[in-house]
Image (spheres, grey):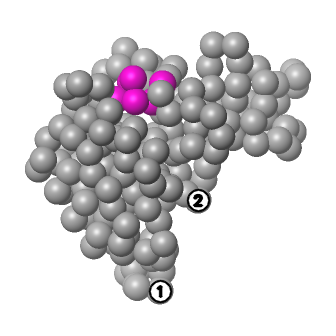
Amino acid sequence: MTSTARDRPDLSRLTLLVVDDNDQMRTIIGAVLAGAGVRNLHFAPDGRHGLASLAANEIDVAFVDYEMPVMHGLDFISAVRGMAGDKRFLPIIMLTGHSDLKRLNAARDRGVTEFLAKPVSARTILKRLETVIYHPRPFAQSPTFFGPDRRRRADVNYRGPRRRASDSTPVFEL
């Protein structure tokens, strides 16, 4: 089955932020997103500039590199998840060339939404974007965590009080 222009989602109304210290990576991701129809793109070379862009603009999704000078991706995620209001729910797609379990768990524990391992392809960039738009996970809050529910699979045999399929609220307490 061949994809047609009618099959592709309209991304023209989205505003996206790309935070990466590598100019070529910002260019690649920006070109893919623009080619897919995104018209409102903001770029930042590090987490601090990314937070400034987030404060000045209504951003729908952020692509954020893990390793950056000044402020790296983990601190960016923590800052966003610690914000007041709706900005703390920002979908954050982490870009990383180091996708070992330790780093993935660290990002997950800070509240990352999705991961994208480098080197990237146009297909994986758009797949992650579609995932956060069309299949958002509910947010969870506990004394030590705020972010998308880290559980990726529902255990059909679990019958305890934290059964997320029966939880109708978008933010729930753990």
Is residue 123 among what the camera can see? Answer: no
- Circle 1 crowding by C-alpha within 10 Å: few under 14, some 14–19, many from 20: few
- Circle 2 crowding by C-alpha within 10 Å: few under 14, some 14–19, many from 20: few
Which residue, given by chain and number where applicable, does mark 1 sit on?
6
- Residue 69: image x %, image y %? 19, 25
Residue at (85, 43) in percent of width and height: 168
Is 160 situated above or below 134? above
Give the structural element (helix, strand or loop) at label 2: helix
Residue at (32, 56) in percent of width and height: 42
Q: Which residues are magenta?
A: 73-78
* In the image, residue 76 lies in the stretch drawn in magenta: yes
Taking depth in this image into account, of 113 and 123 the one nearest to the observer is 113
Residue at (65, 40) in percent of width and height: 85
Residue at (78, 24) in percent of width and height: 173
Which residue, given by chain and number where applicable, does mark 2 sit on?
134
Is 36 situated above or below 92? below
Give the structural element (helix, strand or loop) at label 1: loop
For the stretch drawn in magenta, the main secondary structure is helix
| Amino acid type of the residue that numbered disc 2 sits on in the rendered structure | Tyr
- Residue 154: image x %, image y %? 70, 34
Question: What is the spatial separation of the Cα atoms under label 1 and label 2, in whole angstroms?
Answer: 17 Å
